[in-house]
Amino acid sequence: MALKKVTVAIDVPPTAWVRDLIGTGIESVSILDCLRNADGTITHLFMIRTSDHAKSVRVIEALKRSDLVEGFSLVKAERPNGVVCGLVRSRRCDVCGVIATRCLMRRGVYRVREGKLTWTFVADEEEIPRVLEALREKGIEAELVESVGVEPSGLVSMPQLNLIMRAMEMGYFDVPRRASIHEIARELGLSPASLSVSIRRGVKRVLKDYIAIQGYLA
């Protein structure tokens, strides 16, 4: 399976709830996940970036007023400082309907530029034309702006991976922790300091690969 980082440009559809945020000072809307509910609504986990607290407040007020939003809740309601995170439930957004029914498409970043909604996501190469066709079937024209390969970094060495797996087996990552770094180091014949560094570096590389593949885009 070849993964691609894809950017498409879309005329902001009248059914998209992000349309009601235009003019509030948004910089980007990140859709971290979305799910179609049994009643036909779609719930989005979102993160909206603005430049300051005042613009964040305007975003929240716009969400409250929007006829396209049936309900929303905030992860952190007190004094947002440039970032608004939460859940939005909407019924009418055709773009979101396409995303919610295609599992690889759920995560992405929207930006509104010059009346265009740009959507960046990671997808299987074979799925890209199907997504574009699904949008067109909804009457939404989408222009493919970018399609570049996404490859894992491949920086995790086999010894590092073995250390991580052994630490996991012994319960180092459990809550509460079942094995200390000293216990694992003693079993493996390593110093606790060097083992701790190797595990942290390895976990960081594993996470970077996972984030790239899953499509959590900066």
Image: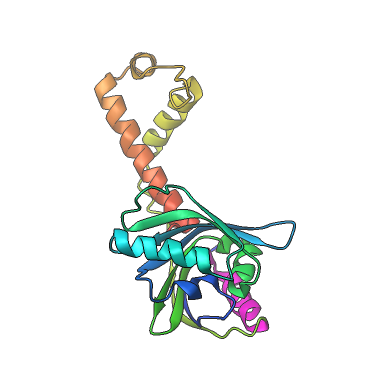
Residue 36 in the image, given as x and y percentages of width and height? 67, 59
Residue nearest the observer in this picture, 83 or 175: 83
Examine the rendered structure and indicate whether residue 137 appears above or below residue 40: below
Q: Is residue 3 visible in the rendered structure shown here?
A: no
Q: Quadrant of residue 128?
A: bottom right
Q: Is residue 16 visible in the rendered structure shown here?
A: yes
Residue 69 in the image, given as x and y percentages of width and height? 58, 65
Residue displayed at 33% across by 65% down:
55
Secondary structure mostly seen in the magenta stretch: helix
Q: Please tell me how many numbered marks the rendered image carries.
A: 0
Question: Is residue 87 shown in magenta?
Answer: no
Residue 197 in the image, given as x and y percentages of width and height? 27, 31
Residue displayed at 42% across by 49% down:
77
Q: Quadrant of residue 104?
A: bottom right
Q: Quadrant of the C terminus?
A: bottom left
Residue nearest the observer in this picture, 138 or 211: 138
- The single residue placed furthest to the right in the displayed view is 38
Examine the rendered structure and indicate whether residue 22 appears above or below residue 88: below
Q: Which residues are magenta?
A: 123-137
Question: Is residue 129 shown in magenta?
Answer: yes
